[in-house]
């Protein structure tokens, strides 16, 4: 254990993070087949693939695109690509046009894909003359690049200043921005997460988030492997088999978005699922977790639910509610974890308790967007990164987020935080999910509207929901229109772009 702790403390690259655990201990479990891969075998195949990529012409800084579903190939190729060049994982659900854009925007030198499928990605690669190499995995859980010879030169551990991973912002407003995450950023983020939750060799994490974004890559995968724990990696999230997987592998924690938590709660009802007894805590991140959902999860699942705050530009985690016996607060994302958090207005830091824009600085925060001086000029102020989120810090330093600045509803000069309305709507009997947003109004500039989904088997009318809000919200905050929908669109990482939902539902009004 001392060796792992020492390795983690000194780590400055992804390879360093994985170097501490003993070679003969289990690193990865593939539940569909029962395959177990040791840390020694994991490091061995990562090194081999890095050497192979180098032999294929990948040099430091070159982008290696991947289009892979969850599994061992996604993990091995991610670390190997970060060693030989820079990993650029893509959502396997992207259509040809989307893949084409990202291959061009990252200047990808090659694309790694599974042996079968991903036709749209292959077409996009062919259109851009990007070579495609298939990954193959044998019965022992060893991943290789099919038909490619290993290089004769061993790839060295990467420079801390080298870019390990390049991702894009969601692109809800304009062209997506490239976020270059350096090895030292990744190492700092992993250390923060391990420290926040006391991760150790005794822990087993279940990876349910996609491995093409920082939530799944950093929070679930790299942090677990840095601590010497075991990582269970299903091919995809399945609410039907979730608790059986937890039980069979003695899972001690998992991290997910509220959408997944909601699905699990819906299936469980009021009955504690068999297998949840092994859970030490549950982590929630990447979207707001309603306080009543947190309380319900703790009651049904029997484990503390810790909401965290993360974003790509911070190599994921910025804040988190702590483990017991320290308090964890509903509707709060907790205190800062290994970084500084401030609240700022007009370039000036505000006193505790005052509301303004959340700003951050720390070793896990990226230096800037790639080749985008205009975005960097507006996103950084005196060394602080502007998150675009509005919030305040309470007297104990816990951060409460009140909305995205660009999503604030301006009704006749009254600034309304949509999350406040979301919380009220979620208290309405029969409402399962809620999302408030602004729509154009001739007199007020903007008016409040909202979309809701209903709980299974429950019938609630728009008039009943409006009446519920009338009793609990001031007139200027009350939604004047409720859209009852089957589902609220989300991105692959569980986030919602309120503006996109508003356009889809109210754009023609």
Image: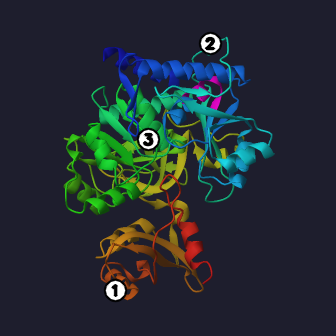
Magenta stretch, residue numbers: 79-86
Q: Are marks 3 and 2 in contact (CB under 8 Å)?
A: no
**In the image, which disc is placed on residue 154?**
2
Q: Which mark lies nearer to you, 3 or 2?
A: 2
Query: Which secondary structure lies at badge 3?
Result: strand
Colour scheme used in the picture? rainbow
Residue receiving disc 1 = 464
Q: Nearer the viewer, mark 1 or mark 2?
A: 2
- The C terminus, quarter of image: bottom right
Q: In the rendered image of this protein, does residue 435 appear above or below residue 86?
A: below
Residue at the (29%, 43%) spot, across then down: 246
Q: Residue 153, can we see it?
A: yes
Within-10-Å neighbours for mark 1: few <14, some 14–19, many 20+: few
Q: Secondary structure at mark 1?
A: helix
Identified at 42% across, 47% down, the residue is 309
Whether pointer 3 and pointer 1 mark residues with C-beta atoms closer than 8 Å, the reply is: no
- For label 3, the crowd category at 10 Å Cα-Cα, with few meaning under 14, some 14 to 19 and many 20 or more, is many
Identify which residue is drawn at 67% across, 24% down: 53
Query: CA separation, marks 3 and 2?
Result: 33 Å
User: Which x, y percent locates residue 440?
Assistant: 58, 79
Residue of label 3: 317
- The Cα atoms of the two marked residues, 3 and 1, are separated by 39 Å
């Amino acid at each position: 254990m001392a060796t792992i702790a020492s390795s983690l403390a000194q780590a400055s690259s992804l390879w360093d993070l994985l170097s501490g655990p003993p070679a003969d201990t289990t690193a990865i479990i593939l539940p569909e087949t029962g395959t177990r891969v040791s840390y020694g075998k994991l490091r061995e195949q990562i090194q081999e693939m890095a050497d192979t990529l180098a032999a294929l012409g990948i040099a430091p800084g070159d982008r290696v695109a991947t289009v892979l579903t969850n599994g061992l190939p996604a993990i091995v190729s991610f670390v190997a690509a970060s060693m030989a060049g820079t990993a650029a994982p893509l959502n396997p659900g992207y259509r040809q046009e989307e893949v084409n854009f990202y291959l061009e925007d990252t200047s990808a030198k090659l694309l790694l894909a599974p042996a079968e499928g991903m036709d749209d990605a292959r077409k996009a690669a062919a259109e851009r003359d990007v070579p495609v190499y298939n990954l193959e995995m044998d019965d022992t859980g060893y991943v290789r690049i099919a038909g490619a010879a290993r290089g004769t030169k061993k790839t060295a551990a990467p420079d801390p200043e080298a870019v390990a991973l390049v991702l894009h912002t969601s692109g809800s407003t304009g062209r997506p921005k490239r976020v270059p995450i350096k090895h030292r950023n990744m190492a700092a983020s992993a250390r923060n997460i391990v420290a926040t939750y006391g991760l150790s060799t005794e822990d087993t994490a279940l990876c349910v988030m996609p491995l093409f974004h920082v939530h799944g890559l950093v929070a679930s995968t790299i942090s677990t492997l840095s601590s010497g724990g075991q990582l269970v990696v299903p091919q995809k999230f399945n609410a039907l088999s979730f608790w059986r997987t937890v039980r069979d592998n003695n899972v001690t924690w998992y991290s997910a978005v509220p959408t997944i938590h909601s699905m699990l709660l819906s299936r469980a009802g009021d009955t504690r699922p068999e297998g949840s007894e092994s859970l030490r805590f549950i982590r929630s991140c990447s979207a707001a977790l309603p306080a009543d959902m947190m309380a319900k999860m703790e009651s049904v699942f029997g484990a503390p639910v810790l909401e965290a705050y993360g974003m790509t530009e911070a190599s994921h985690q910025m804040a988190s509610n702590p483990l017991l016996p320290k308090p964890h607060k509903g509707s709060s994302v907790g205190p800062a974890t290994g970084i500084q958090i401030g609240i700022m207005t007009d370039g000036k830091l505000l006193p505790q308790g005052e509301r303004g824009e959340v700003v951050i600085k720390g070793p896990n925060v990226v230096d800037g967007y790639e080749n985008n001086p205009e975005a960097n000029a507006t996103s950084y102020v005196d060394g602080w990164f502007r998150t675009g989120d509005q919030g305040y810090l309470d007297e104990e330093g816990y951060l409460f987020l009140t909305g995205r600045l660009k999503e604030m509803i301006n009704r006749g000069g009254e600034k309304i935080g949509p999350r406040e309305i979301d919380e009220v709507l979620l208290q309405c009997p029969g409402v399962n999910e809620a999302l408030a947003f602004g729509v154009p109004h001739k007199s007020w500039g903007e008016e409040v509207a909202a979309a809701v989904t209903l709980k299974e088997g429950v019938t609630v009318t728009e008039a009943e929901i409006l009446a519920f809000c009338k009793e609990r919200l001031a007139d200027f905050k009350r939604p004047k229109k409720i859209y009852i929908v089957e589902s609220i669109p989300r991105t692959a990482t569980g986030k919602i772009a309120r503006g996109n939902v508003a356009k889809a539902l109210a754009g023609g009004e």
